């Protein structure tokens, strides 16, 4: 999960179809006067998507009051990652939350299905530097030596929730927010996320096709503009739950 880039001038409102408005409104899992949290489905770009399909950022116009700006994304999730994504409904809330995120006061918890079984050890911390690599229009992250000129520190805590001989369900807590961090870190220990075509993930588990990247942002804790801490959770999506059931892994 990475911070959303700062917007420049607010663009003109995007015209959404009734179906798009209904879809984005159906994603709301928490709302108050300061924030709006949604359960982003896999396949929907947070920002900067290509082609004619609207991004989540553009679809936030469904919540704009007449003559007012739309809610602001505080962070992003990869297009094929599902789960909790946070927006601010006011400029002061966006500033407060942006500073809190940059100050590493957000706590993020993900779940992922990996193959071919539990990592060894079954829990711990991955501390492997990463660097950005580009091939044409595509950007990748690679593990690298700490003294590489482009090295960025990266740290991921993990623990195994359930496992068998073919796959494991992991809980992941990134301490840093590098692009594709969880995906590259897990691939680096020989446990790529199922469905992750870019980093070597399995396209089928025990004969069951994997429809997409099996990575879900299940919970987000953060300081609230009014004080205290909020924790927002998003339930495991049906496609991920179906894979878990098919391969005999029970969530705990």
Image: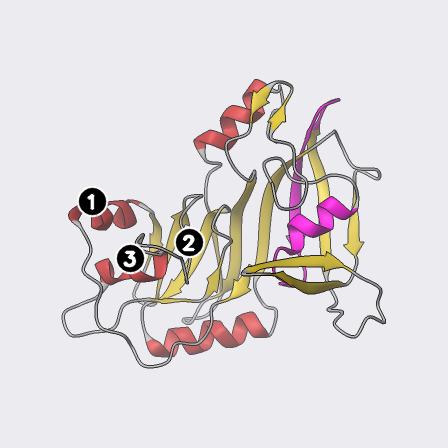
The residue closer to the viewer here, 118 or 207, is 207
As helix, strand or loop, the secondary structure at mark 3 comes to helix
Q: How many discs mark residues in the rendered view?
A: 3
Describe residue 181's horizontal placement relative to residue 127 as left or right: left
Magenta segment boundaries in residue numbering: 163-188
Neighbour class for label 3 at 10 Å: few (<14), some, many (≥20)? many
Which image quarter is the C terminus in? Answer: top right
Please provide percent x and percent y for residue 104.
61, 69
Q: Is residue 4 above or below residue 31?
A: below
Which image quarter is the N terminus in? Answer: bottom right
Please provide percent x and percent y for residue 90.
32, 73
Q: Residue furthest bottom?
A: 9
Occupied quadrant, residue 148: bottom right
Residue that carries the numbered disc 2 in the rendered image: 45
Task: Decide which of tag 1 and tag 2 comes sooner along the chain.
Answer: 1
Task: Decide which of tag 1 and tag 3 comes sooner along the chain.
Answer: 1
Residue that carries the numbered disc 3 in the rendered image: 59
The span from disc 1 to disc 2 (Cα, nearest Å) is 17 Å
Neighbour class for label 2 at 10 Å: few (<14), some, many (≥20)? many
Q: Is residue 232 magenta?
A: no
The residue closer to the viewer here, 138 or 72, is 138
Residue at 77 percent across and 48 percent down: it is: 188
Describe residue 242's horizontal placement relative to residue 247 as left or right: left
Residue that carries the numbered disc 1 in the rendered image: 19
Contact, CB < 8 Å: mark 2 with mark 3?
A: no
């Amino acid at each position: 999960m990475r911070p959303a880039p700062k917007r420049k001038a607010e663009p003109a409102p995007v015209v959404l179809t009734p179906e798009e408005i209904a879809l984005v409104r159906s994603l709301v899992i928490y709302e108050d006067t300061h924030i709006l949290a949604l359960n982003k489905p896999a396949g929907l770009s947070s920002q900067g998507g290509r082609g004619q399909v609207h991004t989540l950022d553009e679809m936030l116009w469904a919540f704009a009051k007449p003559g007012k700006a739309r809610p602001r994304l505080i962070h992003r999730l990869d297009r094929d990652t599902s789960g909790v994504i946070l927006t601010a409904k006011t400029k002061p809330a966006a500033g407060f939350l942006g500073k809190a995120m940059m100050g590493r006061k957000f706590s993020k918890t993900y779940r992922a299905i990996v193959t071919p079984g539990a990592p060894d050890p079954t829990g711990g911390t991955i501390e492997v530097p990463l660097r950005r690599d580009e091939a044409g229009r595509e950007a990748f992250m690679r593990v690298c030596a700490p003294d590489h000129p482009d090295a960025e520190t990266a740290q991921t805590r993990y623990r195994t929730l359930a496992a068998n001989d073919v796959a494991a369900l992991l809980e992941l807590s990134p301490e840093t927010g590098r692009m594709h961090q969880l995906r590259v870190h897990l691939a680096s220990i020989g446990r790529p996320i199922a469905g992750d075509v870019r980093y070597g993930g399995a396209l089928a588990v025990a004969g069951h096709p994997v429809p997409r990247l099996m990575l879900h942002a299940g919970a987000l804790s953060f300081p609230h503009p009014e004080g205290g801490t909020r924790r927002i959770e998003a339930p495991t999506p049906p496609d991920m739950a179906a894979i878990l059931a098919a391969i005999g892994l029970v969530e705990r």
